[in-house]
DNA sequence: AAACAAAACTAACGATTGTTAGTTTTATAC
DNA sequence: GTATAAAACTAACAATCGTTAGTTTTGTTT
């Protein structure tokens, strides 16, 4: 066990609670009880409830952004890019499935700057995804008669992984990757 | 315009607000402001905030349950059953996209009896879906080497339709149905 | 215009919210 | 063992929450 900072422990506990009930329904007293301390004690380690949320979400969003930028910049086929995107989602999900619940469902509770920052990242991520698919169709690497629906469908599945994966009894990452690639791309390639 | 009851107007306004911020983050004063009245006035028409949520969710859940039961009972091929399930989701989404946000994200805020009732319906729905796919694979009607992932992937896409559909500029229902069927089933059949 | 019902209002309640201030306990370093 | 820092505590705050009680306005029927 690595000795995690107290702040990180709080953020991890919050991620679990946020996943179960959503950011707004979790009180600082709920979080404190989960940590075995009193609510006021939390503030020795964090600045605010909002800071917890933004830490969870922005960190994950930047992981996706960095991963996508790397894929976009790489000189590989469209199929390989899509496979890498799938792998990226699986990797992030395995590492922090709880936090992804906040990213997916509570991003709108971010405040001013972080909200704008997040929405920009998400929009650019989707735009990159769409461009990759479109280029693949144009070059004849993949077949897809409706790009919008194909992008939406794939992204929906990848974004919902965090809900589904923990319910499977320790399916191996590599096998999951292989099977997800098959299901999501076999009808397209 | 059909003259909707005041109660239904409140539920519709609530559906929109719940979609934007989630059940817990929407106050009765928010809802009242959206209706152009004071919070206390809402209680001339509804019993509680909880009643609004359960009305939205249970009604939709029963639509899905009834639709699924009809499909299960019908004597058609597996492919046709899957096509009908896709059509069911599209129909419900077109009719009440806002309410589906609550069903997907705020069901855990239902109270005792309704929570149990909802969870039972959802579990049975998924079980029916799984059985249909499994039977189709056994009979050789569809190919799918990983049933769990195929079920999860399809259901994720259909459940997220409510987020995606309103952003498309009036795509026609029949075209959407045809294209969704292609994207979701072409790699399987 | 009188009667009635529907739907709004004002005012307030007890509970809960995130958070702050100040203090005490616990663990570490010399 | 004494000093220091980390992390817990108690107590309370102002704001906001869902909801109730009682009253007034609005609209319809006779």
Image (cartoon, coloured by chain):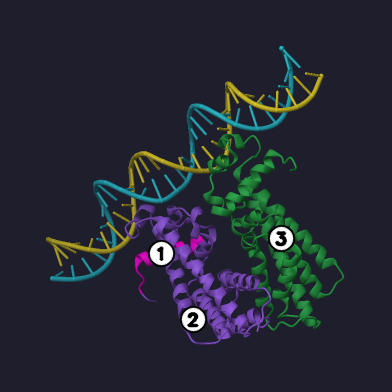
Chain colours: A green, B purple, C yellow, D cyan
Q: Which subunit holds the residue at mark 2?
A: B
What residue is rendered at 74% in x and 72% in y? A181
Q: Which residues are magenta?
A: B3-18
Seen from this angle, which residue lies furthest front?
Answer: B138
Q: Which subunit holds the residue at mark 1?
A: B
Q: Which mark is residue B71?
A: 2
Q: Which mark is residue B55?
A: 1
Q: Which subunit holds the residue at mark 3?
A: A
Q: Is residue B103 left or right of residue B145?
A: left
**Comparing labels 3 and 1, the label whose residue is closer to the camera:** 1
Image location of residue B83, percent across then percent down = 56, 83
Whichever of callouts 1 and 2 sits on the residue coming sooner in the sequence is 1
Neighbourhood count class around disc 1 (C-alpha, 10 Å): few under 14, some 14–19, many 20 upward: some
Q: Which mark is residue B151?
A: none
In the image, A76 versus B108, the foreground residue is B108
Seen from this angle, which residue lies furthest right?
Answer: A75
Label 2 near label 1: C-beta < 8 Å? no
Label 1 near label 3: C-beta < 8 Å? no
Image location of residue A188, percent across then percent down = 72, 80
Q: Which mark is residue A121?
A: 3
Relative vertical location of residue B52 with respect to residue A151 in this rendering, above or below:
above
């Amino acid at each position: 066990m690595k000795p995690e900072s107290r702040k990180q422990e709080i953020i991890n506990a919050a991620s679990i609670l946020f996943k179960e009930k959503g950011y707004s329904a979790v009180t600082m007293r709920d979080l404190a009880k989960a940590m075995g301390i009193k609510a006021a004690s939390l503030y020795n380690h964090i600045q605010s409830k909002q800071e917890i949320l933004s830490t969870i979400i922005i960190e994950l969003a930047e992981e996706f952004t960095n991963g996508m930028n790397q894929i976009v910049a790489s000189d590989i086929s469209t199929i390989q890019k899509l496979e890498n995107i799938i792998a990226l989602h699986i990797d992030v999900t395995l590492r922090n499935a709880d936090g992804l619940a906040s990213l997916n469902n509570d991003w709108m509770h971010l405040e001013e700057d972080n909200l704008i920052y997040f929405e920009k990242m998400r929009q650019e991520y989707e735009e990159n995804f769409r461009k990759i698919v479109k280029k693949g169709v144009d070059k004849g690497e993949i077949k897809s008669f409706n790009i919008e629906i194909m992008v939406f469908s794939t992204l929906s599945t990848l974004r919902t992984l965090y809900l589904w994966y923990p319910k499977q009894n320790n399916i191996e990452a590599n096998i999951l990757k292989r099977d997800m690639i098959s299901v999501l791309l076999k009808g397209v390639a």
